[in-house]
Image (cartoon, rainbow, N blue to C red):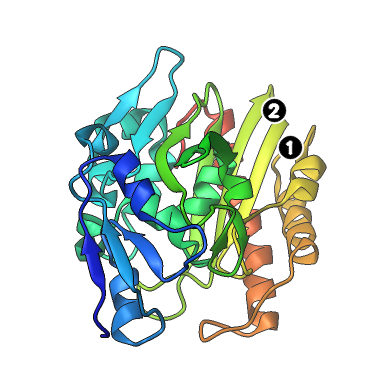
Amino acid sequence: MTPFELVEPASLREAIGALDADDPSTRAIAGGTALMLMMKIGIFRPTRLVSLRRIEERYRHIDLDEDGALHIGALVPLAVLERSPVVAARAPVVTAALLTLSNVRVRNVATVGGHLAHADPHMDLPPVLIALGARVFVVGPSGERWIDVVDLFKGYYETSLANDELIAELVIPAQGKRCAAYLKCTTLSADDWPAVGVAVSIETDGDAIKEAKVALSAATEKAVRLDAVAEYLRGKRGDEATCKQAGEAAADAVNVLADGRGSVEYKKQLVRVYTARAIARAFDAATRGGASV
């Protein structure tokens, strides 16, 4: 690795002040699970790293507000999120997804904010958070703003964050009677990034789907919300025919990319199958009055 400056500010504001809007070689670092690998193989050569490990403790907290929304600090490690009883009670699909996200060594170190800001299209949490309607609170030198998670990702390893902005908090709204499911397929090792990941959130009215959110990742250049599939599902039962047709609609709606985990044709088929399965699982949970799975 080439030499670089390491800065360890004591507050979020100081950290933002140490970043540079015009210099992409200056980067914040939290857990560093992805950034350090990129540095070791020479993909990223920083001139300055701004460590977030000494900033305010409140960015490591998980809280529940009076409306039932989860407020998750950007520096919460994924393993802490995984073991949180309040997350398991309010958004159990997040807990379930984390159990198979990479491996426990990574989850012990990687943070919520870093996981999202890295914008690897193969990550597990983005489609789950999109299906749950989550958003992030972002702070920069010119002020603060909210970004829906679906709008955070702009392309392959690309976000809508400026170089001098940081994610401070993730908020997952109260889910009410909605039920969610997340399914993925890993074609290499069990703890590898998936070849496709599909998250579905459903609210039912009697035995029909009142509203749905469907999100997909890993097979595409970024995590995406499939609004056309959600619109197709409205008013229908989640039976086998409906789920199969929704899977076809999902495969038609996305531009699938080939990589080491599968060809375009193979990943298209995975999109069809796993979208149908995720919808069926979420619908079954919703009609049974169960929780997210």
Q: Which residue is mark 1?
A: 237
Helix, strand or loop under label 1:
loop
| Residue at position x 64%, y 57% in the image | 275
Q: Percent x, y for residue 42?
A: 36, 87
In the displayed structure, 103 sits above or below 126; it is below
Dot 2 falls on a residue whose secondary structure is loop
State the image coordinates of residue 22 (x, y, percent, origin top left).
52, 63
Q: Which residue type does callout 2 highlight?
A: Asp
Say left or right for 224 vs 259.
right
Can you see residue 112? no
Q: Which quadrant does the C terminus fall into?
A: top left
Please name whichever residue, 286 or 157, is drawn nearer the observer in this view of the structure. 157
Q: Position of residue 8 (x, y in %)?
A: 20, 54
Quadrant that contains the N terminus: bottom left
Among the 4 quarters of the image, the one containing residue 40: bottom left
53 lies left or right of 237: left
Tell me the kind of residue under disc 1. Arg
Q: Which residue is mark 2?
A: 207
Give the residue at x 42% y 71%: 25
Q: Local crowd at mark 1 within 10 Å, few (<14), some, or many (≥20)?
A: many
Q: Earlier in the sequence, mark 1 or mark 2?
A: 2
Mark 2 residue crowding within 10 angstroms, few (<14) / some (14–19) / many (20+)? some
Instruction: Say how many tags the image has.
Output: 2
Image point (19%, 64%), residue name = 105
184 versus 231 height, above or below: below
Between 250 and 24, the one nearer to me in the picture: 24
| Residue appearing at x 54%, y 52% in the figure | 161
Mark-to-mark CA distance, 1 and 2: 6 Å
> Mark 1 near mark 2, Cβ–Cβ under 8 Å?
yes
Q: Which mark is residue 127?
A: none
